[in-house]
Amino acid sequence: MDVGDLRIFEAVARLGVMSRAAAELNTVQSNVTARIRALEESLGCRLFERHAGGVSLTDEGRRLLPYAQRIPQLLRDAVWAVRDDGVPRGRLVIGSLETTAALRLAPLLAAYVRACPEVDLTLRTGTTCELVEAVRKGTVDGAFVCGPVVEPELDSRSMFTEELALVAAPGVDSIERLLGSGEVKILVLRAGCSYRQRLEALLARLGVPTPRMLEFGTLEAIYACAGAGLGITMLPRALLERSSTAGTLSLLTPPAAEAIVDTVFVRRREAFATSALKAFLARVEQAFETSAAA
């Protein structure tokens, strides 16, 4: 078994079809099939069940897969470790919630880019679910997400807390009046929206276990639809108060259990921390500590 075998195994496991794995790896299907069979023979077990639609992992294959998935990132980490001389440089990809990026990150990113001109910084936004998965896969170096995140392979650092507000149409002055207005719909950026679970938990406690969910592409669209009475949402109060549309919305304070949320920075625990990432974390932690103290 070598690195090449594990790379082929991972591609077949992920894609479920030998021919698709061969195309991705720029080789022929017969080579992929032969390498998988050789790997199974060397391990003394079957890694895949063959069927008409492709292949699926056996129990042995499922146990091998996490190790195969770590290999590419381990090789990248090895290269970065050799090349890193302590000066922040190279590529740095940071993930963030849309709300965090809009509310808190712009001045920090600008200051970081000025201080570390040799770093090629990229910011990618998404939901907590999307970003945690991106951190696991190594497609982002770390991400600001809604906490808590408790996973053995991830390091999670608390950065700051947000006060959330329940957003509804003008004239809605209480949660009780909101629930008495008919069917409840919740507005989210997309499935996996970071504050959705808190809103659903609140509604469930108030007797609305399965509200309808409507997805929108931008925060501005959510503001407009909430203002028009299409549904409700939950977002950081500070973000809403800075919006030009704040005066056209009702901002209700949810119960304490849902009102405060921790924003944490997550990264893979065993991944090599480049000088670019260390410098970024030192800067943002100092900024958020100073802000909290003020």
Image (tube, grey):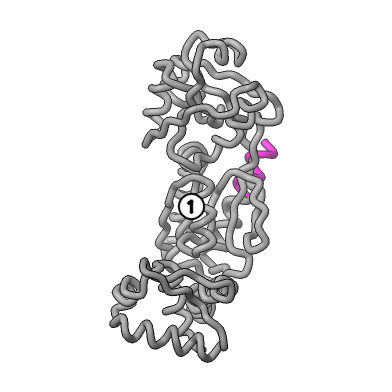
Q: Nearer the viewer, residue 212 or 52?
A: 52
Question: What residue appears at the point 52 percent right and 81 percent down from the top-left corner?
Answer: 46
Against 196, residue 243 (above or below) is: above
Q: How many marks?
A: 1
Residue 146 in picture, x, y percent from top left: 59, 43
Q: Secondary structure at mark 1?
A: strand
The answer to whether one can see residue 69 in this image is yes
Q: Nearer the viewer, residue 285 or 81?
A: 81
Question: What residue appears at the point 59 percent right and 19 percent down from the top-left corner?
Answer: 252
Toward which corner of the image does residue 21 lie, by quadrant?
Answer: bottom left
Against 72, residue 185 (above or below) is: above
- Asked if residue 159 is among those painted magenta in the image, a careful observer would answer no
Question: What residue appears at the point 56 percent right and 71 percent down from the top-left corner?
Answer: 62
Taking the view exactly as shown, the residue that stands out farthest to the top is 171
Quarter of the image where the C terminus is located: top right
Question: Label 1, on which residue?
Answer: 95
Q: Nearer the viewer, residue 158 or 235?
A: 235
The boundaries of the magenta stretch are 286-294
The answer to whether one can see residue 84 in this image is no
Taking the view exactly as shown, the residue that stands out farthest to the front is 52
Residue type at numbered disc 1: Gly
Residue 85 in picture, x, y percent from top left: 52, 77
